[in-house]
Amino acid sequence: MNRLASPSQLRASLIRWALFIVPTVMLLGFLSGQVSGSSADSPWFQSLEKPALFPPPATFGIVWTVLYIMMGLAFAMVCAAWGSRLRRWAIIAFIVQLAINLAWSPTFFAARQIEQALWVIVALDVALIGTVVLFFKVRKWAGVLLLPYLAWALFATVLNWQFLEANPEAGQEEGSGAVQRMEL
C-alpha cells in the first residue's frame, strides 16, 4: 500500500481544521472591528466626506462575514494539505496577511489615520497576492476561495484612497470627534 491516508481520513482532517479555523478567523475579524470602533455610527466616521463608490454601510458586515468564512475554509484546505512542499510557506503567508488585515481597522477607525491605513491596505494587497499564489500552488480551490477576498481588498484600497482624497485633514484633527446635534 502506497497511500498515507485514505480519502475519508483526508476529508476528516479538512473538517477538523475547518471547525477550528473558520470560527477563529471570524472571531479575529469581529474583534478587530469591535476594538477599533469600526462602525458607520461613529461620529468621526459620520463627519467624513464619503466617496461616490462607498456602498451602504450594511454591506460591509455581510461581505466580511462571507469573506471570513471563505478565508477560513481556504486556510483549512491548506492546513490539511500535508503532502504539499509549499504548505508551510502558504500558512506563514496567510498569517502575515491576516495580521495586516486585522491592523487596518484600528489604524483607520481607532487611530483615525487615513493615510497610514492606506499604506496598511497596500501592504495587505501585496501580501494577499502572494498568499493567493501560494494557495493556488498548494490547493487550487483554496486559491479560488481567496479571489473574492482579493477583489474586495483591492476595492477597499480604492475606497481608502478616495477617503484620503476627500478628507485630507481628517487624521490630523486634535478634537474629540464628537458631534453636537441640535433639534429645531
Image: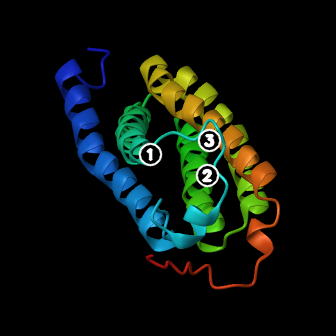
Marks 3/1: CA distance? 10 Å
- Using the rendered view, name the quadrant where residue 162 is placed: top right
Q: Residue at x 67, y 34 (%)?
A: 130
Residue 134 visible, this angle:
yes
- Name the secondary structure under disc 2: helix
- Using the rendered view, name the quadrant where residue 49 is placed: bottom right
**First along the sequence among labels 2 and 1:** 1
Q: Amino acid at mark 2?
A: Val
**Disc 3 marks which residue?**
156
Marks 2/3: CA distance? 18 Å
**Disc 1 marks which residue?**
60
Instruction: Say which of 172 and 150 sits in front.
Output: 172
**Disc 2 marks which residue?**
96
Q: Percent position (x, y) of residue 70? A: 38, 34
Q: Amino acid at mark 3?
A: Ala
**First along the sequence among labels 3 and 1:** 1
Question: Do the residues under discs 2 and 1 have CB atoms within 8 angstroms?
Answer: no
Q: Amino acid at mark 1?
A: Phe
Vertical side of 76 occupied by 107: above or below? below
Q: Percent position (x, y) of residue 178? A: 57, 81
